[in-house]
Amino acid sequence: MPKSSKASDEQGAMEPEIGCIMSRYNRRLFRVAWSVLRDEAAAEDAVQETYVQFFRKHSSFRGDSDLKTWLTRIVINQALMQKRRARPTLPLDDLTPSAEVLLHPALINSEDPEKLAARQEMRIMIERAVAELPDAFRLAFILREVEGLDTEEAAAILGIQVETLRTRLHRAKKHLRMVLDQEVASALTESFPFAGARCAAMNQRVLARLRQEGLVNQA
């Protein structure tokens, strides 16, 4: 049942604020969720649930940690819970590499069909190589190299020692070097897109759920 307007005024967030936060962090959270789940639909669900959880409790956020760090921790936990519900697994440290290949859509704007095809092929190669990393290495790699977090922040989010993070990252890179050359590696920052209509549609679903729960104040 929706909360009273008074409760909504005290605890709810304005729609523009919610939209701004989602637009800012969608890509990072999607990448991180995918690094755990290796499934686009499941990753999108994890991101959606992360926002719902956050806006249910956002009044308790006092800025003790950076917002993107807090959201990243929530999405990792959410993705891990989804993974456990879907298929019981060994602990994260004990998982072995999988040969499963996941091809992400390459949302590229280009007027040159040849360049578009070449860039799409490079992204597919990168994403396939990353998908084949062991789970723990993949998550470390996404946080540190794709999202650009510093070593200490990535280690803190994962709850591991800095040296453990560095070891996982070293092994991830060693594997990737066997697959990718420098030209392909340069495209890493553009891989795993989550934008456009797909991003906007998820934002609307989150807003709809928050409205149903009385957690949003419309501008």
Image (spheres, rainbow, N blue to C red):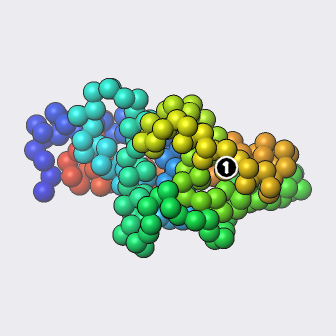
The image position of residue 93, as x and y in percent, is: 49, 56
Specify the quadrant of the image occupied by residue 120: bottom right
The image position of residue 189, as x and y in percent, is: 69, 42
- Total marks placed: 1
| Mark 1: few/some/many CA within 10 Å (<14, 14-19, 20+) | some
Residue beneath label 1, please? 171
Residue 204 visible, this angle: no
Residue 94 visible, this angle: yes
Specify the quadrant of the image occupied by residue 166: top right
Is 49 in front, or is 183? 183
SS label for mark 1? helix
Please state which amino acid type lies under the numbered disc 1: Arg
Q: Residue furthest right?
A: 114
Is 38 in front, or is 105? 38
Q: Quadrant of the C terminus?
A: top left
* Residue at 61 percent of width and 35 percent of height: 148
The image position of residue 176, as x and y in percent, is: 74, 53
Vertical relation: 28 (above or below) 94: above
* Residue at 10 percent of width and 44 percent of height: 4
Is 100 in front, or is 158? 158
Specify the quadrant of the image occupied by residue 39: bottom right
* Residue at 37 percent of width and 29 percent of height: 65
Q: Residue furthest bottom?
A: 87
Is 210 in front, or is 51? 51
Vertical relation: 171 (above or below) 95: above
Report the side of 2 relative to 56 (left or right). Answer: left
Q: Quadrant of the N terminus?
A: bottom left
